[in-house]
Every structure is written in C-alpha cells, then in structure tokens.
Image (tube, coloured by chain):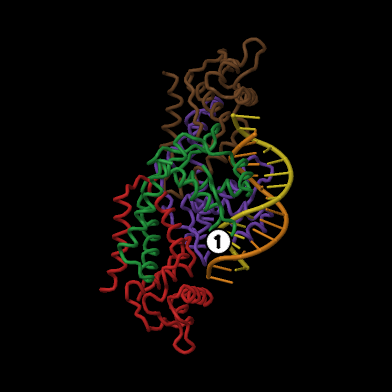
Chain colours: A purple, B brown, C green, D red, E yellow, F orange
Amino acid sequence: MIVTLDYESEVPLYSQLYDEIVRGIAEGSMKPGESLPSVRSLAGDLSINLHTVNKTYQLLKQEGHVLIHRQKGAVVQPPGSAKATPEYMERMERQLRSLAAESICRQLDEAQFLESCRSIYREVKGGSSK
Amino acid sequence: MIVTLDYESEVPLYSQLYDEIVRGIAEGSMKPGESLPSVRSLAGDLSINLHTVNKTYQLLKQEGHVLIHRQKGAVVQPPGSAKATPEYMERMERQLRSLAAESICRQLDEAQFLESCRSIYREVKGGSSK
Amino acid sequence: MIVTLDYESEVPLYSQLYDEIVRGIAEGSMKPGESLPSVRSLAGDLSINLHTVNKTYQLLKQEGHVLIHRQKGAVVQPPGSAKATPEYMERMERQLRSLAAESICRQLDEAQFLESCRSIYREVKGGSSK
Amino acid sequence: MIVTLDYESEVPLYSQLYDEIVRGIAEGSMKPGESLPSVRSLAGDLSINLHTVNKTYQLLKQEGHVLIHRQKGAVVQPPGSAKATPEYMERMERQLRSLAAESICRQLDEAQFLESCRSIYREVKGGSSK
DNA sequence: GTGGTCTAGACCACG
DNA sequence: GTGGTCTAGACCACG
C-alpha cells in the first residue's frame, strides 16, 4: 500500500495519514489481520515524526479500525469492527450537509452531486480489484 | 435565519458559521441581494469574537458567496457566482473519498451511502420552501 | 484544589494527574461547570510539560469527566455524565480482583478488606464537606 | 491452573501473568510447596518471551509469594509469607482511592461499590473450593 | 527492536 | 492568551 501525504496541505498530517490508511482498508489493499508497519519505520518512510504516526495509530484504534496487539503491533480489524454508530452517522451527515449546501450554491444539481458520490464510492470500493 | 454554534465541537467557530450561512444561501432563506448582519451585531448576537465573524465573512467573499460592499456590508451573491471550479471539485472529492472509505469500513453499502447523500441534498435544497 | 504529584513514582505523571482531578470532582472540590486551569498554567504550577497536562485533559474528556469548551477550556461535567458502563465495570472488577487476590495472600480477611474499601469510599465521598 | 493473557490489554503481560498466579494462590488452586512450571516451559505454553516469565517470577519472589529454589524452581510459599505491610496497604489504598473516586463520579453509591468489592473478594476466596 | 512517556521548543489557528 | 500540531530527542518498560 502506497501512502502519499501533502506536506503543504492545511489538513494535519496525522489526519491525512488516517484517511489514507482507512482508504487502504476500505479498498482491501490492507487486509484484516495484517499488521501496519511499526511507528518508527512508517515515520522513517514518510519522513515525518514518529509521534505524528503514533497519533494516527491511536486514532485508528479509537475508531475501531485496528487493534494494538502487544506482539503484532497495529493489526487491521475485520470489516464491521468499526460500526456505523449514531455518532458516526451524525458526523457524516454534518459533513455531507456542508458539501451539499456548498454544491447547491455552486449550481451542482442533484444528479451531478449524486454522480460524484456514486463514482467515488465505487472507486474506493472497487479498489479491492486492484 | 437562525444560526446555532456548537462550542464543544472540534470544528472551529468561524467554519461552523461559514457552513451555516452557506446553508442559508443554499436553502434560499438568505436571498441574493440581501445583506448579512454587520460583523459587530452578529458577533454580539452570537456572543463571539469580532475576529471570528470577520474571518467567516472574508472566507464567504473569497469563495464567491458574498460581496463586501462599503455601505451594505456583506451582500449575498446571486446563485452561480460561486463556481464549481476544478479546485472545488477536487476539494469535494477528497472529502467524499474520505467519507466513502470510512463508510465502507463501517459496512454501509452503496445504496445506504447514496441514500444519505440524496436525502441530505434534498433536505438542504428543499429548505427553500421554508 | 491542591494537586500533588510524585515525580519518583512509576505511575505516569499524566495518570497521577488524572487521578487527582477525578478525586477532586468526586470530593466536590471541583464543581460541575467550573473550568480547569489552562494547560499552560497548570503545567507551569506543577513544573511539568504542557503536553503531559494536555494528555491528562484529553483523557478526562474521553472518559466523560470534562468537556472541552472553545471559550471556557476544560469544564467539569455534572455527576453522572460519565456512566458506569459495562466497560468501566469490567475494568474496575479486574482491578478489584487483583487487589482481592493479593489481599487474600497477605491474609487480610473479608472484614478487613471491606473495611478498607468502605473507609476509602467514605473518605473520598465525604471530601465534599471539606 | 489455567492462565489466560490478553495481548490487546494495556496491562503488561508480565503483570497479567503475575495477577493470574497470585489469584491461583489466593484461590488455592496453587498450593503451598507446589512448584510453578519452569520459566522455559511456561513461556513455551503461553508463547511468550522467556524474559517476560522471568520478570513475573522475580516479582512474585520479591513480593513474597514464591521462593526461588535451585532445583524445584519457583515454589509457592505458605499463606501469610507475604505480609500486609504498611507499604502494601498504602499501595492498595492508593488504588482503591482511585477506583472509589472514579466510581463516585459514575454515580455508583456506597452499597453498589461495596457489593462489587464483596462479591469479588468472595469469588476469589471461594475459588479454593474448585 | 518497539511503543510509551516525558521534555523542550516552535509555529500557527483560533478567538 | 490558548490549544493543536509537529518536530527532535531522550529514557525506559516491554518482550
């Protein structure tokens, strides 16, 4: 799995890294039971601080995407370990509401908006065939 | 138009305020040509800092949602003044990709994900009938 | 409220600080709605690093003892905001099991063990009368 | 006696193992005079590092629960070999204080708290009938 | 070798 | 002024 970070972005590095790993899990390029690289080695590969990687791993654990195993390190959880909890649904809906409003102001009609949602969902989901 | 802010949220106040106003414009409760309240009065009503409101207004201007007029203050622009530029589309797609990946990990299937997208788009769009 | 840390202890500082603050809340010397000192000022008072204090505050938030308010900082939650969840009960029982076993080996009988539990509970609870 | 370790726990393995063995002694499933398995065989059975088992055995010795004998290995000491020293009482009270405070914040009243203490003490003590 | 803890220091977003 | 983010570096517990 290849991770790319945008060091110029205002999105925090730990958050970008989180997104990349979750995408890897969703795509299936990271399989359940697989271990993520050690904090140190990933930090080295990405040329970022190990604390930054550690923060990402703690977040992944908190959200239920990995568990921290004493010997295997951060292990990818099987799909569905993270639940679509009411809290998650609310968070997602808040973000979608913001995107929808912005899109409406920019005159994207419903069909165009949904086409983006659909194609991106499929792009991520279909990543497993790669 | 009623604006509610969550002081306990991770989302910065200026950003929440931006979202609320854009939603108001998208819903049609803020009409083109209308003026937003003055920075001072809105800050007073919401009990927040002048700088915060000012930052929101500058952002709204930058994104093409309002025009800052010397006398009328921040004036809502007609729909389509903000464009669905490639930059915007990229930003939206990055956020959607992140939401889609997280949703896939939480076992929301395509139909469920799109249903959320659709119903929220309609909720915002339909706000104009209020 | 007075906080004392043991810099020699093997119990991490952030954890000792957590315990002290939770005790303050339980005793009633920290009242719901009150704000904790800022990360910086408490770190200064205790002569520890601000990251250490920050870690404690994040933990207090995660456990439901405080909420982080954009303006007021870390605010003590009303009693019962943190719940006696099954997860908490398990954690408590694991620790009690360990203490009970050790006490049995050291020939504390049930009455003596329970007397310790009772008197310490009352000591903390009764702290509110101080 | 069956030992189970949780590799996903925050509690170090050597500490979990210590707890399990002390519990075995308290319950009476490990009898005075009995030898614990050799470091090597226990490490093998549990698939953990030799150092980990060794650290546990040293700790058991230090706390007075076993005696390290050149031929018989770690031998369970008679009850009361480990004393309820002032140091032990302080350590126990610090932990109970922490549990009591957390429980009070989570609105466990004295009766509920003591009921947990009592039932767990009896569960461990009564383990001897197994 | 690995992660956890702690420190020190810096910059910036936020308000 | 305040917290969030990031870096660098150190030490130690764990295995």
Toward the bottom, the furthest residue is D71
- Left-right relation of E3 to A48: left
Pick the residue in front: D68 or F14.
Answer: D68
Which quarter of the figure is the C terminus of chain C placed in? Answer: top left
- Left-right relation of B90 to A69: right
For label 1, the crowd category at 10 Å Cα-Cα, with few meaning under 14, some 14 to 19 and many 20 or more, is few
The residue that appears at 39% across and 40% down in the rendered structure is: C79
- Left-right relation of A130 to B69: left
Quadrant assignment, res D119: bottom left
Q: Is residue D51 visible?
A: yes
Toward the top, the furthest residue is B71
Instruction: Read off the residue under disc 1.
Output: C10
Quadrant assignment, res D28: bottom left
Pick the residue in front: A113 or B26.
Answer: B26
Pick the residue in front: D120 or A71.
Answer: D120
Toward the left, the furthest residue is D129
The residue that appears at 30% across and 51% down in the rendered structure is: D112
Q: Please give the count of numbered marks on the rendered protein.
A: 1
The residue that appears at 45% across and 65% down in the rendered structure is: D86
Pick the residue in front: C107 or A128.
Answer: C107
Residue B92 percent location from the top left of the image: 56, 36
Identify the chain of the residue marked 1, using the numbered disc in the image: C
Secondary structure under tag 1 reads loop
Residue D101 percent location from the top left of the image: 42, 49
Given the image, on which type of amino acid does mark 1 rest?
Glu
Picture layout, residue A128 above or below residue B19: below
Residue A88 percent location from the top left of the image: 44, 42
Q: Is residue B90 visible?
A: no
Residue B58 percent location from the top left of the image: 64, 24
Picture layout, residue D1 above or below residue C51: below
